[in-house]
Image (cartoon, rainbow, N blue to C red):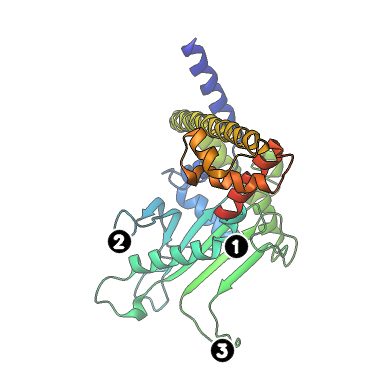
Amino acid sequence: MKEKETEEKKKAARKRLAEMNLLDDFLFGTMVSYPEIREQFVKELLRIIFGRNFKNLSVTAQKVLYGADTDLHGARLDVCLEPEVEEGDGEDVTVYDIEPDQTEGNADRKALPRRIRFYHGKLAARSLESGVDYDKLRNVVIIMIVPYDPFGLGRMVYTIKNYCVEEPDMSYEDGAGTLFLYTKGTKGVPSEALRQLLHYMEATTYENAVNEDLRKLHKMVVKVKKDPEVTVRYMITYLREMERLNKATKKAMEAGMEAGRAAGELYQLVSLVCRKRKRQKSLEEIVEDLEEEISVIEPIYRAAEKFAPEYDQDMVFEQIREDSKQERS
């Protein structure tokens, strides 16, 4: 029975890998770390995004930059490209970090600017050795590719740079830039090629590889997806994720059952207090009868008084829950 279950999970993992798009962490991370294609793949992405060719790139995939100690956040960089040009040739060196992100929770979306600020800080600190002049600090461009509108203005490209509030036209070049690329954006589309690329990344199928550049990318994607080692690696990742989700589900169910028991015990206590109030018993008498602490009974007693003389236990119970919510908020 267990073998059959495992085989079904493996089959599901193979299906998910076949259907995966380029915004998925696993597939994108595999593409930019796959030895035979990673540099070509990344150069194609950057060429379409910026509309120019990139020559000297070193690809570092799935890099984690930790904080000063293990209690601090780490930045996981999906692909770090450096340098764009060789040092010493008179041009600035630029580090590119590409981050596809499918998280659509409101809290995560709201935190995006601070998350980007954190990434910039870690990359800047990493690129400047102790004692080196600040003018040697590398430019950093972070590219976030997302299937949701990060700022709600419908733009396909949001270019973020620092500027002077009082003099917005004043030059202030600190070498830090961020691009948010929204796959469904309709405003300010800089090129049809970029629009087609972003659509393809969100829906990575042959049908959406509508031009020669995308067909090149799609061949690379197919090659990676069909690699037996990649399939095995994803199966392991998938099975671990399923195990983690099962544990989390079990824990949530246990917590729910515990919460249910607590709610049931509270309801029973409310019912007892209401019955005793109908018999005109005082707070002190109820505490003594039920052999409970006054701190437990008094909130129920006060809530019950709002519904005298009926002392409806359901209404009292809901009132206590509402009071509890307000206290927590």
Amino acid bearing label 3: Met
Q: Which residue is mark 2?
A: 68
* Residue at point 51%, 39% (across, down): 287
Whether tag 1 and tag 2 are in contact, CB under 8 A, the answer is no
**How far separated are the C-alphas under marks 1 and 2?**
28 Å
Residue 227 picture location, percent across and down: 48, 31
Q: Secondary structure at mark 2?
A: loop
Decide: few, some or many residues near mark 3? Use Cα within 10 Å; few <14, some 14-19, many ≥20.
few
Residue 233 picture location, percent across and down: 43, 32
State whether residue 212 appears in this view: yes
Residue 93 picture location, percent across and down: 41, 71
Question: As displayed, is residue 249 above or below residue 155?
Answer: above
Q: Secondary structure at mark 1?
A: strand
**How far separated are the C-alphas under marks 3 and 2?**
35 Å
Residue 98 picture location, percent across and down: 51, 57
Question: Nearer the N terminus, badge 1 or badge 3?
Answer: 3
Q: Is residue 306 left or right of residue 171?
A: right
Question: Nearer the N terminus, badge 1 or badge 2?
Answer: 2
Q: Nearer the viewer, residue 68 or 44?
A: 68
Q: How many marks?
A: 3
